[in-house]
Amino acid sequence: MAQGPQFVEHARDGDVHVVRIANAPVNTLRTEVRAGLMAGLKAAAGAKAVVIIGSGRNFSAGAEMTEFGKPRVAPSLTDVFDAIEASPVPVVAAIHGNALGGGLELALACHARVAAPGAQVGLPEVKRGFVPGAGGTQRLPRMIGLEALKIIVGGEPVTAEQAVKMGFVDAVVTGDLEKAAVDWARANAGKSFTLARNRQDKIGGYDATAFDAAVKPLLARARGQESPKGCVEAVRAAFTLPFEEGMKVERDQFQRLVAGEQSQALRHIFFGEREAQRVTDLPADTKPLTVNKLVVIGGGTMGGGIAMSAANFGLPVTIVETSEEALQKGLERCAQNWQRSVTSGRMSQAEVDKRKSLLTGSTDFEGTVGQADLVIEAVFENMAVKKEVFARLDKAARPGVVLASNTSTLDIDEIASATARPELVIGMHFFSPANVMRLLENVRGTKTGYPAIATATEIGKRIGKLPVLVGNCDGFVGNRMTGKRGPQVEKLLLEGCLPADIDRVMEAYGMAMGPLATGDLAGLDIGMAVRKARGTVAPIADAVCAQGRFGQKTGKGWYNYDENRKRIPAPEVEAIILDVAEKMQVRRRTIDDQEILERLLLPMVNEGARILEEGVAARAIDIDVIFCNGFGWPAFRGGPMFWADRMGLKAVRDKLAHYAEATGDRNMEPCALIEKLAAEGGSFAKGK
Ligand code: NAD
């Protein structure tokens, strides 16, 4: 193919001009690509039709986000789209892999679209905190009406097949995509196409009531996030205003949102998720071990979820249990879980059957472990039990096989000491429910070797997880930081809050669930057992437990619960709080929301900084990614370390020192790293 300007190639195929985006790896529409598209379109003069296609695995993943916030360089995407729409012959987008964001907007500006089977098309801008900014919110509603809301406000892609049904992809074509697209363009070149911008048939008769009804469930999911609302307003403009005026509404929303803190936070997490999976010190020549067969020890809550994840991604897996009864119970729970997806219409029976066939069970420990390429242990959380299991695993597993533990609190080094292969022992800390949660903390022990680290990282990615490598310490990263919030929860209750005040502030911030409601869900006896083991007390929490209030499983905890498990403020708990406060001679006061927020988040930030000091996490972004993927932290807030950086570390230091003094919580005394960065005017993002 003749080389045009860099990043775009174009050539004639008979009477059809083919323009190919060649900007590996995902064909973002950077300046050179936009210029190349312009040149390609110009060179198409005299052709009967034009096909725009992507090289590599994608059509285009959209705008080049690293160009955001920098001076704009012409031509803009809108200039390119104007050139497409001005073309005297039809321009056909040929989509494979992904056409997302600006990539789909490019396709929507074309006269027609054809796609390879299974291609994904979508407008995920809302998830990066802004709105499609090159006409997506104006063209898509003109093609599919109100259905555009789901794609633009929801941000989830659909398949090419679904897009054909919805009406914004013309055809799914099989065989070689370029050849099929050229044939399609040639066959349809004589047809008259109505450009999306000129269509009226899907946007006539705007009905505000119907529009708002369609919007309501989509915004209900958005909680405190701004971009879904911006998307709604831009789409509304497609129904109520002429094209050019609607474009102006879209542009205003785009510029406002992209400059805002939420979008910066969302992009921080988006890029961070890739970064956090990269093990910084892994030698380039380290090879992960080949895993074709996973064995999971223990088919309880976690073991079952881990096994499901493997089968969900096509990896054969066997659960080992101690008795036939426990095994059948575990397998049955997985089967029921999958079956629910069929009942709810999320999965076909054939797909579920395929997954089920990849999951087997056994009570023959030695025989099964002997066949494993990787073992993940998920038995009871008890060191003696774990050590016994690992000693047996070491004898039964083939040499070189990695032995991982799903422990959430225990010392990986001590577990590894039960084996003769500590270099192959690693923590793989999944989160519950393990078949759903993306986060995976891979825990490196003192002796864990690079092949084990590479294997745990690789297998984590393969089974749909987001693996982040952390160091071996009590609670690892997520639970260790969250644990530091507990003393402040107790103090806030003592000084003036009720459980609902604390949860309301955290949920208004965007957390999936406040800390007290979370406690009720997990079971308050867990915290009580930890306090007992550590010899610490929490007078209010202990008094709540003493009344048999262990959370949802006992029907009552920090809250009472109705038959639908809806929380109701508990007068009994208020009485306990007032009683303890009186006994401790604490005069209760009104505590404002900002103080509640700071006293809950700052101790976590302080602990996060200690974690960085100790090297337990390699980068601040790792911590933010952990919280946004495993601890219900809203991605549009960017995670605890991002939050602290935004506040400024000098302010963080001053506030920590203030609260340490005011509340007597020594954990809140600013750690050395915060002192240092505050003095230097540094930030977590820039590094220690
Ligand atoms: P669970 O009690 O639901 O399951 C444990 C299972 O292990 C039981 O079915 C038991 O029969 C089986 N088992 C015990 N000894 C065995 C042996 N020698 N061989 C084979 N099977 C054996 O517990 P769980 O909640 O799934 O927790 C398992 C592990 O995961 C623990 O280390 C826990 O700390 C960790 N973890 C739990 C969560 C959570 O939220 N539940 C989250 C992360 C990590």
Image (cartoon, rainbow, N blue to C red):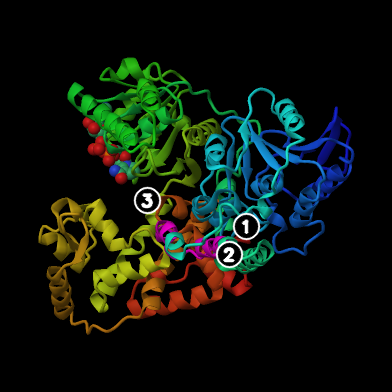
Left/right placement of residue 336 relative to residue 405 reads: left
- Percent x, y of residue 548: 11, 57
Residue at 43% across / 72% down in the picture?
669
Kindly indicate the quadrant of the structure image that contains residue 337: top left
Q: Which residues are magenta?
A: 213-237
Q: Quadrant of the N terminus?
A: top right
Left/right placement of residue 148 relative to residue 4 reads: left
Q: Can you identify the residue that label 3 sits on?
A: 475
Q: Can you identify the residue that label 2 sits on?
A: 237
Which of 539/69 is in front?
Answer: 69
The amino acid on which the numbered mark 3 sits, given as a three-letter code, is Gly
Ligand 1: which quarter?
top left
- Mark 2 C-beta to ligand 1 under 8 Å: no
Residue at 47% across / 21% down in the picture?
292
Cβ–Cβ under 8 Å for marks 2 and 1: yes
Tell which circle, 2 or 1, labels the residue nearer the N-terminal end. Answer: 1
Tell which circle, 1 or 3, labels the residue nearer the N-terminal end. Answer: 1
Q: Quadrant of the C terminus?
A: bottom right
